[in-house]
């Protein structure tokens, strides 16, 4: 059975709710105030099985004060009934509602001339002419115009037939996409808890699923589902759905937010778009404050027109721009946004999302404008290639690509696989990365290691983590590991704690003979090792060469750092052995030593005694107790 969502649009008191009631037998005006005043204030909902199709109706208020509510309801409809009263014809909100439907990209609909019993044939004919003039050149041109009377029943069967035909021709929504349900109502049901309603735009929701409340990271679990008032185990894209949710963060569930698949969608305060300004709207100036509507969400923002010379957008014109928002908005490529002026609040145009997560490069620059033009001109695999290329070695996850491209996960997987087969991209871990970026990354790694060898010829290589931070600080570790494995496997680099070119050899002043002389000098000094200047003078070596050679011997563990001393390992081993012998000869084995004892026993000064005692503490040879140490 086809699931079909129909929305109403039109001026206040033109019979939208009455029409829905006549088609379904359900009064969409659920509030007492609405029923008392005879107008819709909030969104109304009704449903019926018509010609074998499940038809859900979203009835929107027609008063100008409630356009934001109208926008919350009409965003997810498949088909719109533009309602015009026969006794009043086209009115201001008729035009604004029609403009909003057109700007949102609603692709199917009809015109319904209501209250036919209140107008004669000439008046009906005049209204039909005015309607034809209104819809000229739009998606409603050439579509059925049905004249009805909810009171007498005239035209209702014809309208039902129009709905049945439209439902049969409707393309199904993406059930294999990620879950996306903009929340248009939140209420509490005794014994069940929090319930939200909305139109499921994509994906499938099952009882027991965990979903994310976006914007934000609050998680809820689906406790129950209803479609058309009936409890179900799953709801699919294209259905008006009521979701009973439970969780620890229910205060985050509110109208204007959305239930979504966790970890997929991107909340952004910066969105690149293609603008369209209505023909009868004022010029849209660069820097203007705007009300931005998306689904059930409304945020304030400011428009930055692309191009340094772009100062405004004329009525009826288009332009590329960036919207800078006061609050995060969860959007995907291809989403339609309605733009209303800051004050007075009237609809002035729409925007189609080109990139929901653009780079920080400004769109006023020639480079930023060129980037935006290129992204607007590509689609499919070419769009993925552009986004991945722009991400360089950071790459993009497939989930990120779903949000950035606005297509389903299977389509992203297929397009990514095609790019992989063509040698354009490669998947590393959970990231899709441009092959040309990986090639540049390998070259940069090799160049960095070469530069390190030139600057530190006596070092066996560059510390591995320092190399990663220098060359690719924002790339995932898996990408760095992948490139290092390639370079190591091809024999270019030696990949250990320190990374070196395969053919590199340490440049030692004086060669191995010089190192042995230096090592012997420290061994002969025992527990009173010399400083760099002293040993350099005694061996007639350059001080800088001695410093580099000592650093090399420390890395080779042929010398040991006992801060601030450098000591030969043999001296430390003799010290440990002597203390162990002392402990063994002492009755009861309890030996207490201090700085003075060490100075006297080994004939050294305080300068050497204190670092050596701290070394023994670290090695767990001694344990400090106040001013004394106990041999362990």
Image (cartoon, rainbow, N blue to C red):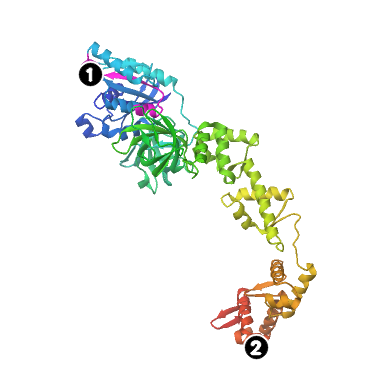
- Where does the image place residue 365, in percent across and percent down from the top left? 49, 41
Q: CA distance from mark 2 to mark 1?
A: 115 Å
Side of 298 relative to 217 (left or right): left
Please tell me whether mark 1 sits on a helix, a strand or a loop: loop
Q: Tell which circle, 2 or 1, labels the residue nearer the N-terminal end.
A: 1
Does the magenta run of residues contain 109? Answer: yes
Residue span colored magenta: 99-119
Q: Quadrant of residue 303?
A: top left
Q: Quadrant of residue 8?
A: top left
Image point (40%, 20%), residue name: 166
Side of 266 relative to 590 (left or right): left
Q: Which mark is residue 600?
A: 2
Please tell me whether mark 2 sits on a helix, a strand or a loop: helix
- Where does the image place residue 614, in percent across and percent down from the top left? 60, 77
Instruction: Farthest residue to the front: give it.
Output: 309
Q: Which residue is mark 1?
A: 87
In this view, the residue in front, 52 or 563, is 563
Instruction: From this view, report whether residue 63 is shown above or below residue 115.
Output: below
Instruction: From this view, report whether residue 566 is shown above or below residue 226.
Output: below
Image point (44%, 20%), residue name: 169
Image point (60%, 80%), residue name: 610
Q: Is residue 235 visible?
A: no
């Amino acid at each position: 059975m086809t699931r079909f969502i129909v929305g109403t649009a039109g001026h206040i008191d033109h019979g939208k709710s009455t029409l829905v009631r006549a088609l379904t037998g359900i009064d969409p005006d659920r509030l007492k105030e609405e029923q008392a005043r005879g107008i819709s204030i909030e969104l109304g909902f009704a449903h019926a099985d018509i010609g074998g199709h499940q038809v859900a109706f979203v009835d929107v208020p027609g008063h100008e004060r409630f356009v934001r509510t109208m926008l919350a309801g009409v965003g997810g409809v498949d088909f719109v009934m533009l309602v015009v009263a026969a006794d009043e014809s086209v009115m201001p909100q008729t035009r604004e509602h029609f403009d909003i439907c057109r700007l949102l990209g609603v692709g199917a609909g009809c015109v319904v001339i209501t209250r036919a019993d209140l107008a004669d044939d000439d008046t009906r004919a005049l209204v039909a002419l005015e309607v034809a003039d209104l819809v000229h050149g739009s998606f409603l041109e050439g579509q059925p115009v049905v004249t009805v009377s909810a009171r007498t029943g005239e035209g209702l069967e014809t309208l039902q037939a129009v709905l049945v035909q439209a439902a049969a021709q409707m393309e199904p929504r993406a059930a294999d996409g990620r879950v996306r349900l903009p929340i248009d109502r939140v209420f509490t049901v005794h014994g069940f808890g929090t319930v939200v309603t909305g139109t499921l735009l994509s994906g499938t929701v099952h009882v027991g699923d965990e979903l994310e409340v976006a914007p934000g990271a609050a998680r809820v679990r689906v406790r129950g589902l209803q479609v058309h008032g009936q409890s179900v185990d799953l709801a699919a894209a294209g259905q008006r759905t009521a979701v009973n949710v439970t969780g620890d963060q229910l205060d985050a569930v509110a109208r204007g937010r959305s239930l979504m698949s966790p970890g997929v969608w991107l909340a952004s305060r910066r969105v690149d778009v293609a603008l369209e300004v209505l023909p009868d709207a004022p010029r849209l100036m660069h820097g203007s404050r705007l009300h931005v509507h998306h689904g059930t969400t409304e945020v304030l923002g400011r428009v930055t027109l692309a191009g340094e010379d772009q100062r405004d957008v004329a009525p009826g014109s288009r332009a590329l721009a960036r919207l800078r928002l006061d609050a995060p908005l969860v959007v995907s490529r291809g989403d339609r946004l309605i733009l209303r002026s800051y004050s007075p609040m009237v609809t002035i145009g729409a925007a189609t999302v080109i990139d929901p997560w653009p780079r920080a490069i400004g769109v006023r620059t020639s480079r930023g404008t060129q980037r935006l033009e290129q992204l607007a001109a590509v689609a499919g695999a070419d769009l993925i290639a552009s986004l991945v290329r722009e991400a360089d070695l950071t790459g993009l996850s497939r989930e990120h690509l779903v949000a950035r491209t606005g297509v389903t996960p299977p389509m992203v997987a297929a397009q990514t696989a095609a790019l992989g087969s063509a040698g354009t991209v490669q998947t590393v871990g959970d990231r899709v990365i441009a092959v040309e970026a990986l090639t540049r990354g390998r070259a940069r790694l090799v160049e960095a290691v070469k530069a390190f060898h030139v600057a530190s010829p006596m070092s066996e290589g560059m510390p591995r983590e320092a190399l990663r931070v220098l060359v690719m600080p924002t790339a995932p570790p898996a990408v760095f590991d992948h490139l290092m494995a390639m370079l190591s496997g091809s024999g270019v680099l030696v990949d250990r704690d320190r990374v070196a070119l395969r053919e590199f050899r340490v440049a030692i002043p004086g060669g191995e003979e010089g190192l042995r002389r230096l090592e012997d000098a420290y061994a002969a000094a025992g527990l009173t090792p010399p400083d760099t200047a002293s040993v350099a003078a005694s061996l007639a070596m350059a001080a800088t060469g001695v410093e580099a050679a000592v650093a090399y011997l420390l890395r080779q563990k042929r010398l040991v750092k006992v801060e601030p001393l450098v000591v030969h390992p043999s001296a430390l081993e003799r010290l440990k052995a002597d203390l162990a012998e002392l402990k063994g000869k002492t009755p009861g084995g309890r030996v207490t030593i201090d700085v003075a004892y060490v100075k006297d026993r080994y004939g050294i000064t305080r300068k050497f005694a204190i670092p050596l005692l701290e070394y023994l503490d670290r090695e767990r040879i001694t344990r400090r107790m106040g001013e004394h140490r106990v041999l362990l």
